[in-house]
Every structure is written in C-alpha cells, then in structure tokens.
Image: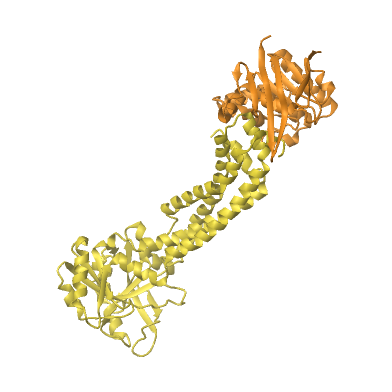
Amino acid sequence: MKYLHLVWAALFRRKTRTFFTIASVLAAFLLFGLLDSVRTAFAQASESVAGANRILTMSRISFTMSLPQSLLARIQAVPGVKEVAYANWFGGVYQDPKNFFANEAVSENFFSVYSDFVVPPEQLAAFRNTRTGAIVGEALAQKYGWKIGDKIPLQATIFPQKDGSNAWTFDLVGIYRVADPKEKNNEQAMFFNWKYFDEARQFGNGAIGWYIEKVDDPANADRIANAIDAISANSDHETKTQSENAFTRSFVSQFADIGLIVAGIMSAVFFTLILLTGNTMAQAVRERIPELAILKTLGFSNPGVLALVLAESVLLVLLGGLAGIALAAVVVPAMSVHASGLLPDNVRPNTWALGIGLMLAIGLVVGVLPALRGMHLKIVDALAGR
Amino acid sequence: MSTLVEIRNLSKVYTRGKQKIEVLHHIDLDIAKGDFLALMGPSGSGKTTLLNLIGGLDTPSQGSLSVGGQRIDSLGEGALAKWRSEHVGFVFQFYNLLPMLTAQKNVELPLLLTKLSAAQRKQNAAIALKLVDLADRATHKPTELSGGQQQRVAIARAIVSDPDLLVCDEPTGDLDRQSAQQVLELLQMLNRDHGKTIIMVTHDPKAAEFASHTLHLDKGTLVEQATQV
C-alpha cells in the first residue's frame, strides 16, 4: 500500500490520455456487464432447480409440430409419472409487436405441475371456472399495470378464431408469483385455459404443443423419458422427452446461441481494448524511462520496478472496468423492466467476478511488456538518454 | 582518516556494436572517509563512468572496488540495488526528480525501501527539506520550483536515508551562478558538519574549489593525484 501513491501519480501523469483510456475501458466493461447479464439470464433460465422433477415431451421433428391429445392417457400410465399437464404456444401480441412476452394455453392442472408458480387458491379456482380466464406473472402485471378483473386483448399471430378474427380477449383472474428471487424472470408469462383456446381456434383442434410430466424422482427422469418416447416410436408423431432445463436450452437456442454471440462480441471488444491499453502503457513507460532509472538508482530492485508498472496497468484497467460494470449495474435493472425477462434485475455476482478476473488478466497482459522493459533498463544508459 | 573508497586496477570497457571502448584504464585510488573530492577532466575522460562505478550504478570490467570495506564489484544486481539504497545518495545535473510528486514525496522515495512507518518517513523527509532550507516548499511539485530549489530537493532526497557517501554528477551544471553557489555551500556544509563523504564530478574549476581535493582524469587515466586545496 505504501507504493500506491507512486502508482497513482504515475497513472495520472498525463491526465487526458489516462482519462480517455479509462473511458474506453469503461465502455468495454459496460458492454460486458450488459451482455454477460443477458447470457446469465439465458443460462439461468435453463438451470431451474424447481424444474428438476419435470420433464417435457414434444415432437421429435420440431418444437412447432404438435402432438395428439390421445397421448395424454398413455403418458399418464407410464410408471414414475405423477401428473401430466400440457400446453400450446400462442404467440399473441399485446397492443404492439414489440411487447413480447410468453403466452400459452395450458391445461387446468398446469399450476399443480408448476407448483413453484404460486397462485392464491381463490384465484386458481377462478381460473378453472372462467372460460376466458388468464393468469399472469406478477412482474408482467406490474409492467403493464394490469390488475385482477382487467380484460387483456391479444392479437394472435398464429391462431385466428373460428370467425377469422385475430382478436382474443382474456379476463385476468389471477397473478402468480415465483418465490425464488433468482427465478423472477419466470414472472414474465401469461397462461390461459387450453379448453377455451382449443374450442375457439380456427385450426389444429385437439392438437397439443407439448406435455409436461411431473416425475416421482428426478433420478428416474431418463428412464421415464425413454418410456414415454417408446410409446410413439415408429409413429407419425415420434416424441422427444427431455428435462425441463434441456428443453429450455433448446428453446433458447432457437433464437440464437447467446453464449457464443456474447463470447464473440466480447473477444473482439477485449482484443481491441488490449491493443489500445497496451499502446497507452507502452507509451507511458517509454516516456518515463529516466524516472524508472532514477527509482532503480535509489535502490528499487528489478522485480520492484516490474511490480510498479504492472500495478499501474492493472489499476488503469480496474478503474475503467469497475466503473463500467457499476454503470451496467445501474442500467441493467432499468432495462430489465422492459426486457421481458431477457435481463436479470441486476448484474449478478458471477458477472462481477468474471469481470474483475478479466480486468486483472487484461491489466497484466497489457502491462507485462512495458514492465519488462522497465525492469531490464540499464541505469547508466537510461540516465544518459541512450 | 580511514579509507572509505578503495579502488585497485579498475578498468571499464564498453561494447558499442562490434567496437570495444576502454573508458577507464587501471585506476588505483583511495578516498578517505569524510573527504570532499572533485573529479575534473575533459568530456569523455571517464569522470562520470568512474562516479557511476563508485556509486554502484555500473560494474567494472576489471579490478576491485570496495566502499566502506565491502567489495561492490562482485555484487549481483539485486544486492547492488540494496547496497545503493543503504549507502549512497545521488545528485545529478538535471535533478531527476519525479515530476508528478511533491518535493516532500520525492524526498520520501528512498525511505519507501526501508521499514519506516509513513509518519516516520514524513518526519525524516521534513527534516531533510529543512536542512536544505526548503521546508516551506514541501508541497510544491518540481515544476513549481526554480532550478536551484529543485537541486536542493534532490540533495535532500540524497541525504534523507543518511548515506555514508554522496555522489554528485555536475550538480551545478544546469544552474546560474547564485544557485550554484548555494548548492555548493550546501554540499560543503553536509561534508563539514555532517561528515558526508562527497565525490563530485564537475567541469567548473570554481565549483571544484569548494572540494577539499581535486583529481583530474584524462582518457580514462588519473593524471594528477589528489591536490590539497
């Protein structure tokens, strides 16, 4: 710590240059904070602990292909299956296409299988008794200012009504909450009665989007999945049954490989940052060769000079990087409200940890060559300006 | 007086590309403890090279060099750095202060290598600055000081860790006559009142008059033995 003032003073020897370098590091880590938060949100969406005892069955060909309703009874009969629910993707739009959120037609027992979605009993009863009833997540209700009793109009993008109209209206009868704070992004969905959907839709009647099975023990999930898939083997509706986490991963991957995109963008950003910051450090040390020679003259050892220059470059990146992620921590919650669950409500600790690790690594990488130059300088040559 | 610096058969050869340049030839020299020695000679005569060797900034190609009874010609780079921090103070022609630090912090620099607490370092630096009559400029940065004042800060930095030996390379070379006079009187006071052994390289015969002895170097050889002033 006693050398900190020396490192600090050296860093701000050229204030303008240091300010611009810190600003570019800040921009890079702000981007990192935002993108890694998106990646984390997607990764966590597919790692739900609550979903460990659920498996999902869908068409082996594609998520968009439906399955016959007749499978329900046969799946229920598979040993180890405690309960079976089903759902269809609706894909409706609220007021404007940019208002994207998941909306699905679900079976009556859906919330029994998804017991981690907590719905007050009287609201659940209203859902069962109201043909056009819908239940939405608390976060989604807050986002659009919905309250129980409201009518929610959705514009269908896939399923028109029998009269050809795309306008569907639902009665909000319940609001579900997710108890685990890490799973709050699951409060961004809307569920309504499958029976109403099936009776009113123009085509595809009787077809199921996917089945959700609650199993007796997660350890038996593979065996049960194989048994379910065996029911439809060699038929025209072969199924693929997998864990909820695997299903979510494959669902998310239909949009894009978020991890790969984030890694690609950040690699390019950090590569540019290394060149930029490395240039700054090289220039800073080149200018200070006589000063480093003086430090060595006074008795600073070679490793001591190496450590001073490395500390300077690490501090440079840390100042910009920490400010960047701190700014992301301000921006992410603000964006999260409008991101339909695609962003967490804050920058997660693992993003901070990864970011700090990257800052240290980049600081060391950009500082190592200038530091070695400082370490190996010959005092008499440096003082003579050679 | 006992001998502080003992030099025997000292040579220094520099290699520049394929060319070898012998800068010092077989120097033998004793410098007594408490001496104030002026080294004079034309440019390229080897004065600064000899000073750098005595100060442990460079190592000889041949011969032996002892300071305070310790052979420094055979010390490794790390040991030599530690030895310099404990035994030698340096004063250069262009002051060589760190521009981003205040006078106080510049003077404290050598003390960072000691086990002194921050308060002790501050106190010692304040005493050194007072000794060079710059206590009121402690918070000023080098650019806010005149050349003479900067050189006095450099002298405070050189003496703050209480070394046995001060090596001064043209300490008045960049100063006006009045500032040079002040710096030389300060060095003389440090020699006379505080017992510091001082070796000073200079081109200026008037500066050399402040020393108790003068040696002349020419083409890497001592051409005149110590002369009592």
* A227 horizontally vs A337: left or right: left
Above or below for B193 versus B128: above
Classify residue B135 by image quadrant.
top right
Q: Report x, y in % for residue B167.
A: 70, 24
Q: Is residue A65 visible?
A: yes
Q: Quadrant of the C terminus of chain B?
A: top right
User: Which sits in the foreground, A109 or B71?
Assistant: B71
Res. B134 visible in picture = no
- Residue A38: give x, y in percent of width and height: 44, 62
A322 on left or right of A145: right
Q: Which image quadrant for residue A80?
A: bottom left
Camera-nearest residue between A123 and B160: B160
Q: Quadrant of the N terminus of chain B?
A: top right
The chain drawn yellow is chain what? Answer: A
In percent of width and height, residue A1 lies at 53, 35
Q: Which chain is depicted orange? A: B
